[in-house]
Amino acid sequence: MIKGFIFDLDGVITDTAELHYEAWKNLSDEMGWDFDRELNEQLRGISRLDSIRVIMDHNNVELEGAKIEELANKKNEIYVASLENITPEDYLPGAKVLLTHLRTEGFKVALGSASKNAIKVLEQLNAMGYFDVIGDGTSVSKSKPAPDIFLYGSEKMGLQPDDCIVFEDAEKGIDAAKAGGFYSVGIGPEERVGHADLRFDSMNEATLFEIKSFFKDLF
């Protein structure tokens, strides 16, 4: 039976994708690297260090580990500064309503995000009260598509993976949910998250009624 929900952050609860894009673009321009929105899509759902390696590979660049770390930190500084502009008005449409309904009905809720800035974002949204467990980029060593962050969330909630539904907007996130034995809801286009158990174009469509209707044997 479904007793818990695990949410990715970016693209599910709020959309910081544009802030990430601007930070990576700023850094890439400074380094003289090619970076565009198509390449940015490849960074969806993966860690900061993995992201910079994708950008380096695209530009046929090799750097020492210490330099990679330095650049990743620099990007993060640009990004964190931009987080100050996030307000409680910046939930994606439908996300706050769903979180409120889950709280009202007594479900356990965890965050399962690769972001090391997840707590800052939740604080800016005034969203900490919706979550029983916070799993972020500091919680596990292996990032998605490894299932570790979701397994961390289910374990901390005291639940088995098949007691939980994962909400994700990234292909690697759905891969991670499947690898961990979780049920999955994809938010986004068919070509990106069509392999989820259930898919919606947006969080606005992902109501608790629709979820219960689809997974009716599990509630």
Image (tube, rainbow, N blue to C red):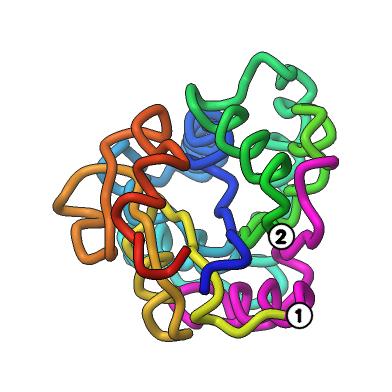
Secondary structure, mark 2, is strand
Residue placed under numbered mark 2 in the picture: 108
Secondary structure, mark 1, is loop
Mark 2 crowd level (few <14, some 14–19, many ≥20, 10 Å Cα): many
Looking at the picture, tell me which residue is in the foreground, 117 or 148: 148
Residue placed under numbered mark 1 in the picture: 158
The answer to whether residue 23 is seen in the rendering is no
| Left or right for 17, reference 185 | right
Separation (CA) of disc 2 from disc 1: 9 Å
Q: At which x and y percent is residue 131?
A: 77, 50
Q: At which x and y percent is residue 36?
A: 31, 37
Question: Which quadrant would residue 178 be assigned to in this image?
Answer: bottom left
- Disc 2 to disc 1: CB gap under 8 Å: yes
* Above or below: residue 155 compared with residue 2: below
Say which label, 2 or 1, has the lower sequence index. Answer: 2
- Magenta range is 129-158
Looking at the picture, tell me which residue is in the foreground, 43 or 94: 94
| Left or right for 117, reference 68 | right
Disc 2 residue type (three-letter): Lys
> Which residue is located at x 69 percent, y 72 percent?
153
Looking at the picture, tell me which residue is in the foreground, 101 or 22: 101
Q: At which x and y percent is residue 196?
A: 28, 63
> Which residue is located at x 77 percent, y 38 percent?
122
Magenta includes 65?
A: no
Disc 1 residue type (three-letter): Gly
